[in-house]
Structures are given as structure tokens and as C-alpha cells.
Amino acid sequence: MTDQAAWVPPEVDPSIPSIARAYDYMLGGAHNFTADRQLAEQAEKAVPGSRQIARLNRSFLARAVRVLVESGVRQFLDIGSGVPTVGNVHEIAQRSAPESRVLYVDKDPIAVAHSQLILAGNENADVLREDLRNPEAILESRQAKRLLDLDEPVAVLMVMMLHWVPEQDDPYGLVGRYRDAICPGSYLAISHVTADQRQDQISEAADVIQRAKSPDQLAYRTHAQVVRLFEGMELLDPGVVGCGLWRTGGSGDFADEPDLNSHVYAGVARKP
């Protein structure tokens, strides 16, 4: 692969790292550039085990989707879905319930372009290029109107997304706008980076991202702050815990090194 590959949209500057593409690299994907890989490697040096943490988070997403399907959810809004990789939401949901409808949302043009390729021919899934901070634009989009009925339960997924929203952008109010738009019986799933376990290392990772001049900057939060993001919702057991501790079912769901399981908090909640 070269940084001038044919799959690169013309508006993309390969010299500017993308969090979505760095995450793709951590998960073993191929749709990333030198700048993305350098950022991921520097993050791994700052926080040893970052690749495993990324995989633990991906495993949480899969478990959450399965739980939601078992709870009767057939509509999913995956915001900040990233570059497609193994275990996408539509694959997991439609495997158990083929009628499940999924709308992916991401602002990264490469994530959107590859989602379009993967979803070609799937009438029950689509992708929208939009920013998390524009809930009305997302919910009023042509894709949302086709796939989502907001009068029926929908699961909003914000996995590894809200720590890119700084306090000045009011992440709590932002989540509230999505919560208010969905009907009772709907769900919200969140995973979020914290520095509660390794303050120095996570702070260094935030500095690495800042020095890389990525347009997205890390705003890690405490357990209490992550719980606050679920305000107005009823948390499912076991509440907000490390993503490697949320309803684990097998060895691939958690790390042997205990503190790696809790670098990312995760939870799923239901709107009463």
C-alpha cells in the first residue's frame, strides 16, 4: 500500500493524521497513512497496550449490539463508526435479525467511502458523512429518514467518540439532544477514555495527539463524568465499568493485565 493509493479521496491530506485511521491501524486495518501510523505508534509508546485496549473496545461494541438485538432493538445509529473492519454493527445485528437497520455516521471521508463500498447492495444499512456535534443534521438527513423511525426504539452508539468533544462543546448537552430525540425504550451505548487508571500515561497520549496537530484532541474524563453522560437514562447492569469488564463472555473480551480492562469506561442505558 502507498499513501497515494487509488482509494484516497482527493480532499484528504495524508500528512495530517486522522484518529479514525489511526484506530484502523491499531485494529490491524490497511486504510491508513504514514502520519496515522506514526500517531498510533507514539500513542502505544505513551500508553503500552493501546492496541489491546482498542481491541477490547471493539469487543465491547460487539457484545453491546448482541445484547441490544436480544432486547428487541432493530434500529442502530452508529455515530463515529470509523473505517470499516471486522465485526461491523450491521454484520452483528443482521446475523441475528436480518431486518435490522443501521445508519453509520462519520466525518472522515475515507471511513465514509469504504463504508459505502461495503454497504453496496445492503438496503438496510447506509452511511452519512457528518459530525457528531450536529445531531439535527444527522437525524433529519435523507439516510436517517429512510432507515430510522424515531417513534420506535433505536440504539444510539457513541463508541470511543465523546472523548473527542471538549468540555467547552458541552458533551452532556450534546448527548441530551440525542436522548431527547429518541423515544422511550431506546438505548444509548457509550465507551470513553479515562485517565483514572494511568493519569501520566493518558496525559502523555493527549500531548502526543496535540503535537501531531490532529484536528481531534483527547478530552479524557473521570468515572463520574462518564456516568453523567447517561443522565436521564437507566443504566443496564453492571453500570459504567471498564470496557473489558462489561458483560464479558470469553477470554477475548478482557485482558490478562487487569488495568488494561479499565482504560476505557463503557456502559449501555435505556430511556425510560
Image: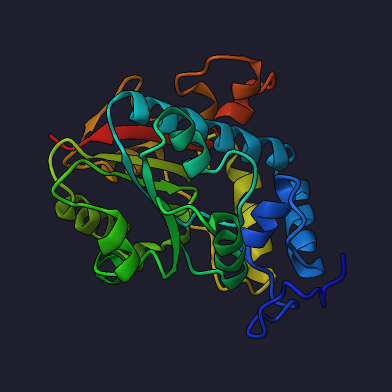
Q: Residue at x 20, y 52 (%)?
A: 149
- Among all residues in the image, which is located at the extreme front? 121
Residue 272 horizontal/vertical position (percent)? 12, 34
Which of 188 and 146 lies nearest the eye of the viewer?
146
Residue 207 in sight: no
Lateral position of residue 189 relative to residue 10, left or right: left
Lateral position of residue 125 relative to residue 36, left or right: left
Residue 169 horizontal/vertical position (percent)? 33, 67
Snapshot quadrant of residue 88:
top right
Residue 21 horizontal/vertical position (percent)? 67, 61
Residue 131 in sight: yes
Question: Please, is residue 140 above or below residue 43 in the view?
Answer: below
Residue 70 horizontal/vertical position (percent)? 34, 23
Lateral position of residue 267 relative to residue 24, left or right: left
Which of 27 and 209 lies nearest the eye of the viewer?
27
Question: Please, is residue 245 above or below residue 220 in the view?
Answer: above
* Colouring scheme, one of rainbow, by chain, secondary structure, one colour: rainbow
- Among all residues in the image, which is located at the extreme bottom? 10
- Among all residues in the image, which is located at the extreme right? 1
Which of 172 and 82 lies nearest the eye of the viewer?
82
Q: Residue at x 56, y 73 (%)?
A: 215
Question: Please, is residue 195 above or below residue 1 in the view?
Answer: above
Snapshot quadrant of residue 235:
top left
Q: Residue at x 12, y 39 (%)?
A: 184
- Quarter of the rendering occupied by the N terminus: bottom right
Snapshot quadrant of residue 185:
top left
